[in-house]
Amino acid sequence: MTRELWDRFPKKAYAIVREANPDGTLVIGPAFWGSIDYPDQLELPEEDRNIIVTAHYYWPGELTHQGAHWSQHKDLSGIE
């Protein structure tokens, strides 16, 4: 999924949520599985001070994904 395509979702969700709940806190993440490398590319309304941007950081992969059956590190374990 491209960043441009991903950016459509928060904009649509933002409008829907703010209509129903104008003061609630929103948690929004960037494209590429919420990668820590992309939060600055989110286009968010500057006047809305009730948004939390979330990001994920999974490095080194050998540590964070050890034993995960879907990862290339599925056979690793005991890494601290």
Image (tube, rainbow, N blue to C red):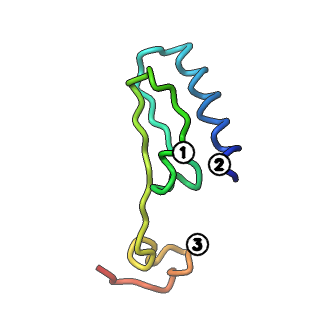
Indicate whether 54 appears above or below 22.
below
Element at badge 2? helix
CB atoms of marks 2 and 1 within 8 Å: yes
Q: Which residue is mark 1?
A: 41
Amino acid carrying label 1: it is Gln
Amino acid carrying label 3: it is Trp
Choose top left, top right, bottom left or bottom right for residue 53.
top left
Q: Earlier in the sequence, mark 3 or mark 1?
A: 1
Q: Which residue is mark 3?
A: 70
Choose top left, top right, bottom left or bottom right for residue 51.
top left
Residue that sits furthest to the left in the current view: 80
Q: What numbered label is drawn on residue 76?
A: none
Query: Where does residue 19 sit, x and y in percent of width and height?
Result: 56, 13
Indicate whether 76 appears above or below 27.
below
The image quadrant where one finds the C terminus is bottom left
Circle 2 packing at 10 Å, graded few (<14), some (14-19), many (20+), is: few
Element at badge 1? helix
Element at badge 3? loop
Q: Which residue is mark 2?
A: 3
Query: Where does residue 45 sit, x and y in percent of width and height?
Result: 51, 26
24 vs 51, nearest the viewer: 51
Write the residue at 52% across / 31% down.
Answer: 44
Write the residue at 45% across / 30% down.
Answer: 26
Q: Earlier in the sequence, mark 2 or mark 1?
A: 2
Q: Nearer the viewer, mark 3 or mark 2?
A: 2
Write the residue at 48% across / 57% down.
Answer: 37
Query: Where does residue 5 sit, x and y in percent of width and height?
Result: 71, 44
Q: Earlier in the sequence, mark 3 or mark 2?
A: 2
> Could you tell whether 1 is left or right of 38 in the image?
right
CB atoms of marks 3 and 1 within 8 Å: no
Mark 3 to mark 1: distance in Å? 28 Å
